[in-house]
Image: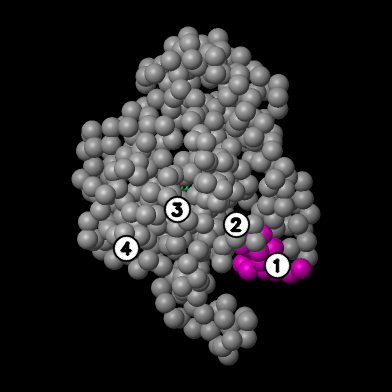
Amino acid sequence: MSGYRIPFNKPGLAGNELAYIADAIQRGHSAGDGCYTAQCQDLLQRDLGCPRAFLTTSCTHALEMCAFLLDIQPGDEVIVPSFTFVSTVNAFVLRGAKPVFIDVRPDTLNLDERLLKGLLTPRTKAILPVHYAGVGCEMDAIASVAGRYGVKVVEDNAHGLFARYRGKYLGTFGQLATQSFHETKNVSCGEGGALIINDPIYVERAEIIREKGTNRSRFYRGEVDKYTWVDLGSSFLPSDLLAAFLWAQLEKYEEIRTTRHRIWQTYAEGLSEWAGNAGVSLPYIPPHVEQSYHMFYLMMPSLTARSRLIQHLKARGILAVFHYVPLHLSDMGMRFGGRAGACPITESVSDRIVRLPFYNDLSPDQQAEVIETIRTFRC
Ligand SMILES: Cc1ncc(COP(=O)(O)O)c(C=O)c1O
């Protein structure tokens, strides 16, 4: 959105994006699965320690691939937080699944694992934890319930690349996980994502689904003498030009993380006294979790206070935003039986959350201005 001196988000450049794109063009491979795609996938596999990572055109598409891989059929149920982006659930509804909305914990805004048992039925196929703001869900409890009931876990880790839960990377707990490289994410290429496969049984089929349902990848490797239609699928692989852009960011992910850590810490320190006096909560990070520093939010005491704060910032040229209209109260969610009061924490936080400007190039002066402007606000 333009017209703000301090926008909410500004896609950052890590430095080598144009050089790598030019190189990809010169190599004459601009379709998918060129050398930059391979480099990005290798880095994800090596650093996360997962058996296989596939770049995709978006996190949304990676989630759609998960629904294919789990063979979701009409009437299957998936347990999904109501407080998430629409793609977490739409990807499964596209295959006929019925979403079962679960409320979030009031502290981390992650799926409340204590509610899982009450929502599982013989039709439950998958639990979809979303690591909100790159702060890990309670994966021990989730994995234990899923294991006991024979249900798969797909982590939507759009926000949490290289964050950890009890020392282990997010995205490496579920059988499958997804990442986003959308321009609002810590590491981005405009639009992009990745499918992380932790159970190798899914690798072969994922390769086919990502290549329009064909065994083209096997053909390129010389394993078959022609390629053909062998399964369902779509075009889920990104151009190598996008992968070249992404590589420029991924190779600097530690620097990006350091920058974002500083921004997050500066907000936390600069706003804690004001928040305490104003009845505002700051994000809670459990001690056993290392977050990704994806976002900084304020939990205001009321909807009115939230609207007034956003207006106060806007009048001074600063854009702050809110998000996630509860999915169970959306038009689609209500068609699946969603009703007011079903997820009370989600309904409350969705009215009160404000996300502050947060991007790699947010300068210390700009951030000081955001903090000072908030400090002059009275709830
Ligand atoms: C939790 C979550 N999941 C999925 C997505 C979709 O990501 P993408 O835009 O890469 O498809 C988003 C987008 O912001 C998100 O916040």
**Residue at numbered disc 2:** 48
- Asked if the residue under mark 2 is in contact with the one under mark 1, i.e. CB atoms within 8 Å, the reply is no
Picture residue at 46% right of the left edge, 60% below the top: 176
Q: Is mark 3 within 8 Å of ligand 1?
A: no
The crowding category of the residue bearing disc 2, from other C-alpha atoms within 10 Å (few below 14, some 14 to 19, many at least 20), is many
Disc 1 marks which amino acid?
Cys
Element on which disc 3 rests: strand
Q: Tell me the distance, in whole angstroms, between the alpha carbons under discs 2 and 4.
A: 25 Å
The overriding secondary structure of the stretch rendered in magenta is helix
Identified at 58% across, 90% down, the residue is: 225
- Asked whether the viewer can see residue 20, the reply is yes
- Point out the frontmost of discs 4 and 3: 4
Q: Return the mark for residue 129.
A: none
Q: Earlier in the sequence, mark 1 or mark 2?
A: 1
Give the image location of residue 301, x and y in percent: 39, 18
- Say which residue label 4 marks: 150
Where is mark 3, residue-wise? 155
**Which residues are the magenta region?**
27-45
Of the image marks 4 and 3, the number of the one nearer the N terminus: 4
Quarter of the figure that contains the N terminus? top right
Mark closest to the chain's N terminus, 1 or 3: 1
Give the CA separation, mark 3 to mark 2: 14 Å
Secondary element at tag 2: helix
Where 113 falls versus 214 (above or below)?
above
Earlier sequence position, callout 2 versus callout 4: 2
Circles 1, 3 touching at the beta carbon (< 8 Å): no
- Contact between labelled residues 2 and 3, with CB atoms less than 8 Å apart: no
Q: Residues within 10 Å of mark 4 (few under 14, many from 20)?
A: few
Q: Amino acid at mark 3?
A: Glu
- Residues marked 2 and 4 touching at CB (< 8 Å): no
Reading the image, the residue beneath label 1 is 35
